[in-house]
Image (cartoon, rainbow, N blue to C red):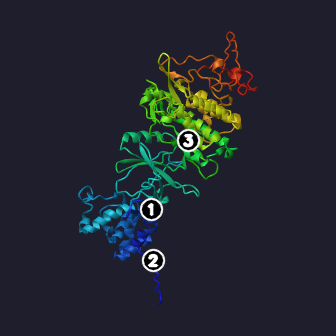
Amino acid sequence: MATLHVDMEPNMACQLRRSMVDFPGKEGRKFLPIKKLEEIVTRETTKRELQSTGVPNGRINAILDDIFAPPTRRKIFAIIVLIERASDIQEFIRSGLDDSNLPFSKTSFDSQHASQLQFFRAWKYVETEFFYEHQWVLLAPFFVFPTATIHAAPHYEFQDRVILPYIQSDETNPATRVEGGFSDVWKVKIHTAHHNLPSNPGQSQCFAIKRLRRSDKGQFDSESKALRRFNHPHIIKLLATYEQNKRYHLVFPWADGDLRDLWASYPSPHTKLQGSIRWLAGQCTGLAHALRTIHQPLSGAGGIRGRHGDLKPDNILWFGKGQGGLGTLVIADFGLTKFHSDASKSCSKAAAVAFSPSYRPPECDIENGMATDRFDIWSLGCLFLEFVTWVFYGYDHVVSTFPSRRYEDDNSKSQEDKFFRVVIEPPGRLTVVVKPAVTQWVESLRSHPSCPGYLRDVLDLVRYSMLVMDPKGRLDADGVYRALFAMEQKHFGRFRNEWVLEEEQPHLEEASSPPPSAGKRPRGFGRFGDIETDTAPGPEAALPPTAPVPVPVKRQKQAKNEDIRNYSCPYRKRNPLRFNIRSHQKCALTTFPDISQVK
Protein backbone atom coordinates (compact mmCIF):
# COMPACT_ATOMS: atom_id res chain seq x y z
CA MET A 1 0.00 0.00 0.00
CA ALA A 2 1.30 3.37 -0.93
CA THR A 3 2.06 5.81 1.93
CA LEU A 4 0.58 9.26 1.65
CA HIS A 5 3.08 11.98 2.53
CA VAL A 6 1.54 15.32 3.44
CA ASP A 7 4.11 18.10 3.26
CA MET A 8 2.18 20.50 5.39
CA GLU A 9 3.34 22.49 8.41
CA PRO A 10 1.09 22.10 11.50
CA ASN A 11 -1.15 25.07 12.10
CA MET A 12 -0.48 27.51 14.95
CA ALA A 13 -2.88 25.90 17.45
CA CYS A 14 -1.25 22.50 16.94
CA GLN A 15 2.26 23.95 17.42
CA LEU A 16 1.20 25.73 20.60
CA ARG A 17 -0.25 22.56 22.11
CA ARG A 18 2.80 20.48 21.18
CA SER A 19 5.13 23.02 22.82
CA MET A 20 3.36 23.12 26.19
CA VAL A 21 5.31 21.79 29.17
CA ASP A 22 3.72 19.76 31.97
CA PHE A 23 3.88 21.28 35.41
CA PRO A 24 5.37 18.53 37.66
CA GLY A 25 3.07 16.93 40.18
CA LYS A 26 -0.12 18.56 38.90
CA GLU A 27 -1.77 16.47 36.21
CA GLY A 28 -3.35 18.49 33.43
CA ARG A 29 -1.55 21.74 34.27
CA LYS A 30 0.74 23.00 31.53
CA PHE A 31 2.59 26.17 30.60
CA LEU A 32 3.98 27.51 27.36
CA PRO A 33 7.63 28.66 27.60
CA ILE A 34 8.14 32.28 26.60
CA LYS A 35 10.62 31.46 23.86
CA LYS A 36 8.24 28.96 22.28
CA LEU A 37 5.57 31.64 22.16
CA GLU A 38 7.99 33.97 20.39
CA GLU A 39 9.05 31.24 17.95
CA ILE A 40 5.52 30.18 17.07
CA VAL A 41 3.59 33.47 17.06
CA THR A 42 5.57 35.56 14.56
CA ARG A 43 4.36 38.17 12.08
CA GLU A 44 4.51 35.66 9.24
CA THR A 45 2.63 32.84 11.01
CA THR A 46 0.10 35.31 12.42
CA LYS A 47 -0.50 36.69 8.94
CA ARG A 48 -1.22 33.19 7.62
CA GLU A 49 -3.54 32.50 10.57
CA LEU A 50 -5.51 35.71 9.94
CA GLN A 51 -5.79 34.94 6.24
CA SER A 52 -7.15 31.48 7.03
CA THR A 53 -9.93 33.04 9.13
CA GLY A 54 -11.08 35.32 6.32
CA VAL A 55 -9.71 38.66 7.54
CA PRO A 56 -9.42 41.01 4.52
CA ASN A 57 -5.84 41.36 3.24
CA GLY A 58 -6.09 45.11 3.32
CA ARG A 59 -6.50 45.13 7.09
CA ILE A 60 -3.97 42.45 8.00
CA ASN A 61 -0.85 44.68 8.17
CA ALA A 62 -2.55 47.15 10.50
CA ILE A 63 -3.70 44.27 12.73
CA LEU A 64 -0.17 42.85 12.78
CA ASP A 65 1.19 46.21 13.90
CA ASP A 66 -1.34 46.28 16.74
CA ILE A 67 -0.42 42.74 17.80
CA PHE A 68 3.38 43.08 17.83
CA ALA A 69 3.96 46.73 18.68
CA PRO A 70 4.27 47.42 22.44
CA PRO A 71 2.14 46.83 24.36
CA THR A 72 1.86 43.52 22.54
CA ARG A 73 -1.15 41.26 22.10
CA ARG A 74 0.86 38.14 21.29
CA LYS A 75 -0.44 36.18 24.31
CA ILE A 76 -4.04 37.18 23.70
CA PHE A 77 -3.74 36.10 20.08
CA ALA A 78 -2.29 32.71 21.10
CA ILE A 79 -5.18 32.16 23.52
CA ILE A 80 -7.90 32.90 21.00
CA VAL A 81 -6.12 30.75 18.40
CA LEU A 82 -6.34 27.83 20.85
CA ILE A 83 -10.11 28.32 21.17
CA GLU A 84 -10.51 28.90 17.41
CA ARG A 85 -11.59 32.57 17.57
CA ALA A 86 -8.50 34.17 15.98
CA SER A 87 -10.51 36.75 14.05
CA ASP A 88 -11.75 38.25 17.34
CA ILE A 89 -8.33 39.81 17.84
CA GLN A 90 -9.89 42.85 16.18
CA GLU A 91 -12.38 43.16 19.06
CA PHE A 92 -9.52 43.17 21.61
CA ILE A 93 -7.75 45.86 19.60
CA ARG A 94 -10.86 48.03 19.37
CA SER A 95 -11.47 47.63 23.11
CA GLY A 96 -7.91 48.70 23.93
CA LEU A 97 -7.06 45.42 25.68
CA ASP A 98 -3.53 44.00 25.51
CA ASP A 99 -1.33 41.42 27.26
CA SER A 100 -0.82 43.69 30.27
CA ASN A 101 -4.52 43.32 31.11
CA LEU A 102 -4.15 39.56 31.61
CA PRO A 103 -5.31 37.63 33.47
CA PHE A 104 -9.02 38.25 33.18
CA SER A 105 -10.89 37.00 36.20
CA LYS A 106 -14.41 35.64 36.05
CA THR A 107 -15.57 38.82 37.72
CA SER A 108 -13.86 41.03 35.14
CA PHE A 109 -16.99 40.89 32.97
CA ASP A 110 -18.95 42.64 35.72
CA SER A 111 -16.26 44.96 37.07
CA GLN A 112 -13.43 47.14 35.78
CA HIS A 113 -13.31 45.66 32.26
CA ALA A 114 -17.06 45.21 31.81
CA SER A 115 -17.41 47.90 29.15
CA GLN A 116 -14.34 46.65 27.28
CA LEU A 117 -15.48 43.05 27.33
CA GLN A 118 -18.94 43.57 25.84
CA PHE A 119 -17.96 41.51 22.81
CA PHE A 120 -17.62 38.43 25.04
CA ARG A 121 -21.39 38.41 25.35
CA ALA A 122 -21.54 37.13 21.77
CA TRP A 123 -19.39 34.12 22.77
CA LYS A 124 -20.78 30.83 23.93
CA TYR A 125 -20.39 30.14 27.65
CA VAL A 126 -17.98 27.28 26.98
CA GLU A 127 -15.77 29.57 24.87
CA THR A 128 -15.55 32.09 27.70
CA GLU A 129 -14.56 29.28 30.08
CA PHE A 130 -11.92 28.06 27.64
CA PHE A 131 -10.44 31.54 27.42
CA TYR A 132 -10.28 31.79 31.21
CA GLU A 133 -8.55 28.40 31.54
CA HIS A 134 -6.17 28.74 28.59
CA GLN A 135 -4.88 32.16 29.63
CA TRP A 136 -2.95 30.61 32.55
CA VAL A 137 -0.93 28.49 30.11
CA LEU A 138 0.51 31.73 28.69
CA LEU A 139 1.14 33.46 32.03
CA ALA A 140 4.01 31.48 33.60
CA PRO A 141 6.19 34.19 35.21
CA PHE A 142 9.75 35.18 34.35
CA PHE A 143 12.10 35.41 37.36
CA VAL A 144 14.57 38.29 37.33
CA PHE A 145 17.29 37.07 39.69
CA PRO A 146 20.10 39.27 41.06
CA THR A 147 23.16 39.59 38.83
CA ALA A 148 26.21 41.83 38.63
CA THR A 149 23.94 44.69 37.52
CA ILE A 150 20.77 43.69 39.41
CA HIS A 151 21.49 43.69 43.12
CA ALA A 152 18.19 43.28 44.95
CA ALA A 153 16.16 40.08 45.03
CA PRO A 154 12.65 40.87 43.70
CA HIS A 155 9.36 39.99 45.39
CA TYR A 156 6.42 38.66 43.39
CA GLU A 157 2.77 38.26 44.28
CA PHE A 158 1.27 35.47 42.19
CA GLN A 159 -2.41 34.69 41.86
CA ASP A 160 -3.35 31.23 43.03
CA ARG A 161 -3.99 29.98 39.47
CA VAL A 162 -0.60 31.09 38.12
CA ILE A 163 1.40 28.10 36.85
CA LEU A 164 5.04 28.43 37.89
CA PRO A 165 7.63 27.57 35.20
CA TYR A 166 8.99 24.47 36.93
CA ILE A 167 9.99 21.48 34.84
CA GLN A 168 11.06 19.45 37.88
CA SER A 169 9.83 19.70 41.46
CA ASP A 170 10.30 17.56 44.57
CA GLU A 171 7.52 19.29 46.49
CA THR A 172 5.41 16.15 46.71
CA ASN A 173 8.35 13.78 47.22
CA PRO A 174 8.74 13.15 50.97
CA ALA A 175 12.04 11.34 50.38
CA THR A 176 13.81 14.47 49.14
CA ARG A 177 11.75 17.29 50.62
CA VAL A 178 13.34 18.69 53.77
CA GLU A 179 10.82 19.41 56.50
CA GLY A 180 11.74 21.72 59.37
CA GLY A 181 9.97 23.23 62.31
CA PHE A 182 9.41 26.54 60.55
CA SER A 183 9.59 25.72 56.84
CA ASP A 184 9.77 23.09 54.09
CA VAL A 185 12.49 23.06 51.43
CA TRP A 186 12.51 21.22 48.13
CA LYS A 187 14.39 21.24 44.84
CA VAL A 188 12.98 22.60 41.60
CA LYS A 189 14.30 23.10 38.11
CA ILE A 190 13.09 26.28 36.44
CA HIS A 191 12.73 26.36 32.66
CA THR A 192 15.73 28.23 31.23
CA ALA A 193 13.42 30.56 29.30
CA HIS A 194 11.90 31.81 32.54
CA HIS A 195 14.88 33.20 34.43
CA ASN A 196 17.78 35.47 33.58
CA LEU A 197 20.72 33.41 34.87
CA PRO A 198 23.09 32.04 32.22
CA SER A 199 23.03 28.35 31.40
CA ASN A 200 26.65 27.35 31.88
CA PRO A 201 27.67 23.81 30.88
CA GLY A 202 28.20 21.60 33.92
CA GLN A 203 26.48 24.08 36.22
CA SER A 204 23.28 23.13 37.99
CA GLN A 205 20.12 24.92 36.94
CA CYS A 206 18.33 23.74 40.05
CA PHE A 207 16.98 25.98 42.78
CA ALA A 208 15.75 25.57 46.33
CA ILE A 209 12.25 26.69 47.25
CA LYS A 210 11.74 27.40 50.93
CA ARG A 211 8.09 27.72 51.97
CA LEU A 212 7.37 29.09 55.42
CA ARG A 213 4.90 26.94 57.31
CA ARG A 214 3.07 29.85 58.84
CA SER A 215 1.45 32.66 56.88
CA ASP A 216 3.30 35.08 59.14
CA LYS A 217 4.33 38.19 57.25
CA GLY A 218 6.47 39.28 60.19
CA GLN A 219 8.55 36.11 60.06
CA PHE A 220 8.82 36.35 56.29
CA ASP A 221 9.90 40.00 56.39
CA SER A 222 12.45 39.24 59.09
CA GLU A 223 14.19 36.52 57.09
CA SER A 224 13.93 38.10 53.65
CA LYS A 225 15.14 41.50 54.85
CA ALA A 226 18.06 39.85 56.63
CA LEU A 227 19.12 38.05 53.44
CA ARG A 228 18.73 41.13 51.25
CA ARG A 229 21.27 42.96 53.40
CA PHE A 230 24.18 40.77 52.38
CA ASN A 231 26.22 40.10 49.27
CA HIS A 232 28.94 37.72 50.40
CA PRO A 233 30.25 34.47 48.87
CA HIS A 234 29.95 32.70 52.24
CA ILE A 235 26.36 33.84 52.89
CA ILE A 236 23.50 32.19 51.00
CA LYS A 237 22.24 34.38 48.19
CA LEU A 238 18.54 35.15 48.09
CA LEU A 239 17.39 35.07 44.47
CA ALA A 240 13.71 36.00 44.82
CA THR A 241 10.66 35.78 47.06
CA TYR A 242 7.02 35.28 46.18
CA GLU A 243 3.61 34.90 47.77
CA GLN A 244 1.08 32.40 46.44
CA ASN A 245 -1.91 30.71 48.04
CA LYS A 246 -1.35 32.95 51.08
CA ARG A 247 2.03 31.30 51.70
CA TYR A 248 5.46 32.90 51.55
CA HIS A 249 8.29 31.39 49.49
CA LEU A 250 12.01 32.15 49.17
CA VAL A 251 14.12 31.09 46.18
CA PHE A 252 17.80 30.15 46.61
CA PRO A 253 20.50 28.40 44.58
CA TRP A 254 20.36 24.65 45.12
CA ALA A 255 23.26 23.41 47.25
CA ASP A 256 24.92 20.02 46.94
CA GLY A 257 24.23 19.45 50.62
CA ASP A 258 25.06 20.82 54.03
CA LEU A 259 28.16 20.49 56.18
CA ARG A 260 27.17 17.00 57.31
CA ASP A 261 26.80 15.93 53.68
CA LEU A 262 30.32 17.15 52.98
CA TRP A 263 31.64 15.17 55.93
CA ALA A 264 29.69 12.09 54.86
CA SER A 265 31.09 12.35 51.31
CA TYR A 266 34.59 11.99 52.74
CA PRO A 267 34.02 9.64 55.72
CA SER A 268 37.77 9.11 56.25
CA PRO A 269 39.07 12.35 54.78
CA HIS A 270 42.49 12.70 56.35
CA THR A 271 44.20 10.69 53.61
CA LYS A 272 42.31 12.69 50.98
CA LEU A 273 43.02 16.07 52.51
CA GLN A 274 46.78 16.15 52.10
CA GLY A 275 47.38 19.53 50.48
CA SER A 276 43.78 20.58 51.14
CA ILE A 277 44.22 21.97 54.66
CA ARG A 278 44.62 25.33 52.99
CA TRP A 279 41.14 24.88 51.52
CA LEU A 280 39.80 24.18 54.99
CA ALA A 281 41.62 27.27 56.29
CA GLY A 282 40.05 29.42 53.58
CA GLN A 283 36.57 28.12 54.42
CA CYS A 284 36.98 28.78 58.14
CA THR A 285 38.27 32.29 57.46
CA GLY A 286 35.44 32.88 54.98
CA LEU A 287 32.77 31.76 57.42
CA ALA A 288 34.24 33.98 60.13
CA HIS A 289 34.29 36.93 57.72
CA ALA A 290 30.66 36.20 56.79
CA LEU A 291 29.70 36.17 60.46
CA ARG A 292 31.54 39.45 60.94
CA THR A 293 29.50 40.87 58.07
CA ILE A 294 26.30 39.79 59.83
CA HIS A 295 27.37 41.20 63.19
CA GLN A 296 28.85 44.52 62.17
CA PRO A 297 26.68 47.62 61.67
CA LEU A 298 25.69 48.07 58.05
CA SER A 299 26.50 51.32 56.30
CA GLY A 300 23.43 53.50 55.97
CA ALA A 301 21.46 51.25 58.34
CA GLY A 302 21.69 53.49 61.39
CA GLY A 303 24.01 51.22 63.39
CA ILE A 304 21.87 48.10 62.88
CA ARG A 305 23.65 44.89 63.93
CA GLY A 306 22.70 41.28 63.35
CA ARG A 307 22.86 37.95 65.16
CA HIS A 308 22.31 34.71 63.25
CA GLY A 309 21.17 32.71 66.26
CA ASP A 310 21.13 29.19 64.76
CA LEU A 311 24.59 28.19 63.51
CA LYS A 312 24.79 24.41 63.12
CA PRO A 313 25.95 21.95 60.42
CA ASP A 314 22.47 21.87 58.87
CA ASN A 315 22.65 25.63 58.27
CA ILE A 316 26.10 25.60 56.65
CA LEU A 317 25.42 24.72 53.01
CA TRP A 318 27.93 23.08 50.70
CA PHE A 319 28.27 24.17 47.07
CA GLY A 320 30.59 22.88 44.37
CA LYS A 321 30.43 19.09 44.50
CA GLY A 322 31.99 17.63 41.37
CA GLN A 323 33.51 20.93 40.23
CA GLY A 324 37.04 20.29 41.49
CA GLY A 325 38.28 20.87 45.00
CA LEU A 326 35.87 20.58 47.87
CA GLY A 327 33.65 23.54 47.01
CA THR A 328 32.41 26.44 49.12
CA LEU A 329 30.61 26.61 52.46
CA VAL A 330 27.99 29.28 53.07
CA ILE A 331 25.90 30.35 56.05
CA ALA A 332 22.17 29.82 55.45
CA ASP A 333 18.78 29.77 57.18
CA PHE A 334 18.26 33.24 58.56
CA GLY A 335 14.86 32.40 60.04
CA LEU A 336 16.08 33.08 63.59
CA THR A 337 18.31 36.02 62.68
CA LYS A 338 17.65 39.19 64.65
CA PHE A 339 18.73 42.74 63.90
CA HIS A 340 18.99 45.42 66.52
CA SER A 341 20.49 48.83 67.09
CA ASP A 342 23.69 49.47 69.01
CA ALA A 343 21.62 50.73 71.90
CA SER A 344 19.68 47.46 72.24
CA LYS A 345 22.30 44.93 71.21
CA SER A 346 22.36 43.22 74.63
CA CYS A 347 18.68 43.41 75.48
CA SER A 348 17.56 39.94 74.35
CA LYS A 349 17.29 37.32 77.06
CA ALA A 350 19.08 34.16 75.95
CA ALA A 351 16.50 31.84 77.53
CA ALA A 352 13.80 33.39 75.31
CA VAL A 353 15.81 32.91 72.10
CA ALA A 354 15.14 29.92 69.83
CA PHE A 355 18.24 27.79 69.37
CA SER A 356 19.61 24.37 68.38
CA PRO A 357 20.15 22.43 71.64
CA SER A 358 23.55 20.93 70.85
CA TYR A 359 25.14 24.20 69.76
CA ARG A 360 23.54 26.60 72.22
CA PRO A 361 25.84 28.71 74.39
CA PRO A 362 25.78 28.48 78.20
CA GLU A 363 23.99 31.81 78.64
CA CYS A 364 20.83 30.05 77.42
CA ASP A 365 20.82 28.03 80.66
CA ILE A 366 21.74 30.88 82.98
CA GLU A 367 19.13 33.02 84.67
CA ASN A 368 19.13 36.50 83.14
CA GLY A 369 21.69 35.40 80.52
CA MET A 370 21.75 37.83 77.58
CA ALA A 371 21.89 36.89 73.90
CA THR A 372 24.44 39.10 72.16
CA ASP A 373 26.48 38.60 69.01
CA ARG A 374 28.85 36.38 71.10
CA PHE A 375 26.00 33.85 71.04
CA ASP A 376 27.11 32.96 67.50
CA ILE A 377 30.80 32.78 68.47
CA TRP A 378 30.14 29.83 70.80
CA SER A 379 28.17 27.98 68.09
CA LEU A 380 30.87 28.65 65.48
CA GLY A 381 33.51 27.34 67.90
CA CYS A 382 31.52 24.11 68.24
CA LEU A 383 31.39 23.79 64.44
CA PHE A 384 35.13 24.40 64.08
CA LEU A 385 35.82 21.72 66.67
CA GLU A 386 33.66 19.24 64.78
CA PHE A 387 35.37 20.28 61.54
CA VAL A 388 38.81 19.39 62.95
CA THR A 389 37.36 16.17 64.38
CA TRP A 390 36.24 15.18 60.89
CA VAL A 391 39.70 15.88 59.48
CA PHE A 392 41.44 13.41 61.78
CA TYR A 393 38.85 10.90 62.93
CA GLY A 394 36.31 10.90 60.10
CA TYR A 395 32.56 11.26 59.79
CA ASP A 396 31.56 8.60 62.33
CA HIS A 397 33.42 10.35 65.12
CA VAL A 398 31.64 13.64 64.32
CA VAL A 399 28.12 12.20 64.35
CA SER A 400 28.56 9.36 66.84
CA THR A 401 31.69 9.13 68.99
CA PHE A 402 32.14 12.79 69.95
CA PRO A 403 28.40 13.39 70.63
CA SER A 404 28.32 10.21 72.72
CA ARG A 405 31.20 11.46 74.86
CA ARG A 406 29.37 14.75 75.43
CA TYR A 407 26.14 12.91 76.15
CA GLU A 408 27.79 10.68 78.76
CA ASP A 409 29.42 13.71 80.37
CA ASP A 410 26.10 15.51 80.83
CA ASN A 411 24.55 15.76 84.28
CA SER A 412 21.16 17.22 83.35
CA LYS A 413 17.96 15.23 83.71
CA SER A 414 17.39 15.13 79.97
CA GLN A 415 21.05 14.35 79.13
CA GLU A 416 22.09 16.33 76.07
CA ASP A 417 25.14 16.40 73.84
CA LYS A 418 25.73 20.14 74.35
CA PHE A 419 29.30 21.36 74.92
CA PHE A 420 28.89 22.59 78.52
CA ARG A 421 27.21 21.43 81.70
CA VAL A 422 25.76 23.02 84.80
CA VAL A 423 27.36 22.15 88.15
CA ILE A 424 26.43 23.03 91.71
CA GLU A 425 29.26 24.25 93.90
CA PRO A 426 29.11 24.82 97.65
CA PRO A 427 27.19 26.57 99.03
CA GLY A 428 24.64 25.76 96.33
CA ARG A 429 25.99 28.05 93.64
CA LEU A 430 25.04 27.22 90.05
CA THR A 431 27.95 27.38 87.64
CA VAL A 432 28.44 26.34 84.02
CA VAL A 433 31.67 24.78 82.77
CA VAL A 434 32.97 23.35 79.52
CA LYS A 435 32.45 19.62 79.70
CA PRO A 436 35.64 17.76 80.61
CA ALA A 437 34.86 15.44 77.68
CA VAL A 438 35.16 18.45 75.36
CA THR A 439 38.49 19.69 76.78
CA GLN A 440 39.88 16.15 76.68
CA TRP A 441 38.71 15.84 73.10
CA VAL A 442 40.48 19.06 72.15
CA GLU A 443 43.71 17.79 73.70
CA SER A 444 43.41 14.46 71.86
CA LEU A 445 43.07 16.34 68.57
CA ARG A 446 45.93 18.68 69.40
CA SER A 447 48.22 15.77 70.25
CA HIS A 448 47.28 13.83 67.11
CA PRO A 449 50.56 12.74 65.47
CA SER A 450 49.49 14.23 62.13
CA CYS A 451 48.08 17.50 63.48
CA PRO A 452 49.64 20.40 61.52
CA GLY A 453 50.48 23.70 63.16
CA TYR A 454 47.53 25.46 61.56
CA LEU A 455 44.97 23.13 63.13
CA ARG A 456 46.72 23.33 66.51
CA ASP A 457 46.29 27.10 66.33
CA VAL A 458 42.62 26.66 65.40
CA LEU A 459 42.08 24.38 68.38
CA ASP A 460 43.71 26.93 70.68
CA LEU A 461 41.50 29.64 69.23
CA VAL A 462 38.38 27.53 69.80
CA ARG A 463 39.29 26.45 73.32
CA TYR A 464 40.58 29.72 74.74
CA SER A 465 38.77 32.40 72.73
CA MET A 466 35.48 30.92 71.53
CA LEU A 467 34.28 28.22 73.96
CA VAL A 468 34.49 30.65 76.86
CA MET A 469 31.76 30.61 79.50
CA ASP A 470 31.49 34.35 79.95
CA PRO A 471 30.29 35.90 76.66
CA LYS A 472 32.39 38.98 77.38
CA GLY A 473 35.48 36.79 77.39
CA ARG A 474 34.88 35.48 73.86
CA LEU A 475 36.37 37.16 70.86
CA ASP A 476 33.94 38.98 68.64
CA ALA A 477 33.50 37.91 65.00
CA ASP A 478 36.04 40.49 63.83
CA GLY A 479 38.64 39.08 66.22
CA VAL A 480 37.97 35.50 65.10
CA TYR A 481 38.25 36.50 61.45
CA ARG A 482 41.51 38.39 61.98
CA ALA A 483 42.96 35.51 63.99
CA LEU A 484 42.16 32.99 61.26
CA PHE A 485 43.50 35.33 58.60
CA ALA A 486 46.74 35.63 60.59
CA MET A 487 46.98 31.85 60.83
CA GLU A 488 46.69 31.52 57.07
CA GLN A 489 49.53 33.96 56.56
CA LYS A 490 51.60 32.27 59.22
CA HIS A 491 51.24 28.74 57.88
CA PHE A 492 50.59 29.19 54.16
CA GLY A 493 52.38 32.41 53.32
CA ARG A 494 50.90 35.72 52.35
CA PHE A 495 48.02 35.63 49.94
CA ARG A 496 44.94 37.68 49.29
CA ASN A 497 41.45 36.26 49.54
CA GLU A 498 39.63 37.25 46.37
CA TRP A 499 36.37 37.80 48.20
CA VAL A 500 37.77 40.26 50.76
CA LEU A 501 37.74 43.89 49.77
CA GLU A 502 41.15 45.51 49.84
CA GLU A 503 40.18 47.99 52.53
CA GLU A 504 39.01 45.08 54.70
CA GLN A 505 42.33 43.22 54.60
CA PRO A 506 43.98 43.20 58.02
CA HIS A 507 47.08 45.39 58.15
CA LEU A 508 50.43 43.65 57.99
CA GLU A 509 51.18 43.80 61.67
CA GLU A 510 47.63 42.73 62.50
CA ALA A 511 47.71 39.67 60.28
CA SER A 512 51.22 38.68 61.30
CA SER A 513 50.64 38.59 65.04
CA PRO A 514 49.80 35.33 66.82
CA PRO A 515 46.18 34.27 67.12
CA PRO A 516 44.36 36.12 69.86
CA SER A 517 44.40 34.51 73.29
CA ALA A 518 46.37 31.52 72.01
CA GLY A 519 48.36 30.33 74.97
CA LYS A 520 46.53 32.60 77.42
CA ARG A 521 43.39 31.81 79.34
CA PRO A 522 40.81 34.60 79.20
CA ARG A 523 39.24 35.95 82.34
CA GLY A 524 36.35 33.75 83.42
CA PHE A 525 37.34 30.83 81.18
CA GLY A 526 35.57 27.64 82.11
CA ARG A 527 33.09 29.08 84.60
CA PHE A 528 30.21 31.46 84.31
CA GLY A 529 27.05 31.63 86.39
CA ASP A 530 25.04 33.69 88.80
CA ILE A 531 28.19 34.43 90.80
CA GLU A 532 31.20 36.63 90.26
CA THR A 533 33.13 35.06 87.40
CA ASP A 534 36.03 37.32 86.52
CA THR A 535 38.43 36.17 89.23
CA ALA A 536 41.11 34.78 86.97
CA PRO A 537 43.98 32.65 88.30
CA GLY A 538 47.56 33.78 88.04
CA PRO A 539 49.27 33.93 84.65
CA GLU A 540 51.17 30.68 85.12
CA ALA A 541 48.07 28.75 86.22
CA ALA A 542 46.11 30.20 83.30
CA LEU A 543 48.30 28.68 80.61
CA PRO A 544 47.43 25.34 79.04
CA PRO A 545 50.25 22.80 79.35
CA THR A 546 51.15 23.00 75.66
CA ALA A 547 51.11 26.78 75.28
CA PRO A 548 54.29 28.89 75.26
CA VAL A 549 54.81 31.29 78.13
CA PRO A 550 54.57 34.87 76.84
CA VAL A 551 57.68 36.95 77.35
CA PRO A 552 56.96 39.94 79.61
CA VAL A 553 57.62 43.27 77.94
CA LYS A 554 58.84 46.30 79.78
CA ARG A 555 57.02 49.47 78.93
CA GLN A 556 59.12 52.33 77.66
CA LYS A 557 59.53 55.19 80.03
CA GLN A 558 57.90 58.23 78.62
CA ALA A 559 60.27 61.18 78.56
CA LYS A 560 59.02 64.58 79.43
CA ASN A 561 57.42 66.47 76.55
CA GLU A 562 57.87 63.39 74.34
CA ASP A 563 54.95 61.60 72.72
CA ILE A 564 55.90 57.93 72.61
CA ARG A 565 53.09 55.72 71.36
CA ASN A 566 53.14 52.10 72.36
CA TYR A 567 50.97 50.46 69.73
CA SER A 568 49.84 47.12 71.12
CA CYS A 569 48.81 44.05 69.22
CA PRO A 570 45.35 44.79 67.77
CA TYR A 571 44.03 41.51 69.17
CA ARG A 572 44.63 42.71 72.75
CA LYS A 573 41.82 45.21 72.62
CA ARG A 574 40.62 44.45 76.13
CA ASN A 575 44.00 45.29 77.73
CA PRO A 576 46.09 47.07 75.08
CA LEU A 577 49.13 47.60 77.32
CA ARG A 578 49.54 43.97 78.33
CA PHE A 579 51.19 42.92 75.08
CA ASN A 580 53.18 45.48 73.12
CA ILE A 581 53.64 45.03 69.42
CA ARG A 582 57.39 44.66 70.01
CA SER A 583 56.80 41.31 71.71
CA HIS A 584 55.90 39.82 68.34
CA GLN A 585 58.85 39.25 66.08
CA LYS A 586 56.85 39.59 62.88
CA CYS A 587 55.23 42.79 64.02
CA ALA A 588 58.42 44.51 65.14
CA LEU A 589 59.91 44.56 61.65
CA THR A 590 63.41 45.88 61.14
CA THR A 591 62.04 48.37 58.65
CA PHE A 592 60.25 50.06 61.54
CA PRO A 593 62.98 50.76 64.12
CA ASP A 594 60.86 53.41 65.82
CA ILE A 595 58.06 51.50 67.53
CA SER A 596 55.95 54.64 67.67
CA GLN A 597 55.73 54.58 63.86
CA VAL A 598 54.23 51.09 63.70
CA LYS A 599 50.49 50.74 63.58
Q: Earlier in the sequence, mark 2 or mark 3?
A: 2
| Secondary structure of the residue carrying numbered label 2 | loop
Residue underneath mark 3: 399
Residue neighbourhood size for the residue with mark 3, other residues' Cα within 10 Å, grouped as few (<14), some (14–19), many (≥20): some
Q: CA distance from mark 1 to mark 3?
A: 47 Å
In the rendering, at what x and y percent does residue 599 appear?
66, 25
Residue at 33% in and 63% down: 133
- Residue contact at pointers 1 and 3, CB within 8 angstroms: no
Where residue 185 appears, x then y in whole percent? 45, 49
**Which residue matches tag 1?**
34
Which is in the foreground here, disc 1 or disc 3? Answer: 3
Image: 182 above or below 597 = below
Q: Considering only order in the chain, which callout, 2 or 1, is on the residue closer to the N terminus? A: 2
Residue 235 pos. (x, y %): 53, 42
Name the kind of residue labelled 1 in the image. Answer: Ile
To which residue does mark 2 refer?
9
Question: CA gap, disc 1 to disc 2?
Answer: 21 Å
Question: Within the image, what quadrant is residue 34 found in?
Answer: bottom left
Quick one: 272 or 16, which is closer to the camera? 272
Asked whether residue 479 appears in the rendered view, the answer is: no
Quick one: SS at disc 3? helix
Q: Nearer the viewer, residue 76 or 174?
A: 174
Q: Are marks 2 and 3 in contact (CB under 8 Å)?
A: no
Q: Residue at x 45, y 83 (%)?
A: 6
In the rendered view, tell whether residue 274 sits above or below residue 559. Answer: below
**In the rendered structure, which amino acid carries the disc numbered 3?**
Val
> Residue lying furthest top in this view?
560
Residue 398: percent from the left, percent from the top?
58, 40
Which of the 4 image quarters holds residue 389?
top right
User: Which sits earlier in the primary sequence, circle 1 or circle 3?
Assistant: 1
CA distance for labels 2 and 3: 62 Å
Q: Is residue 518 left or right of residue 367?
A: right
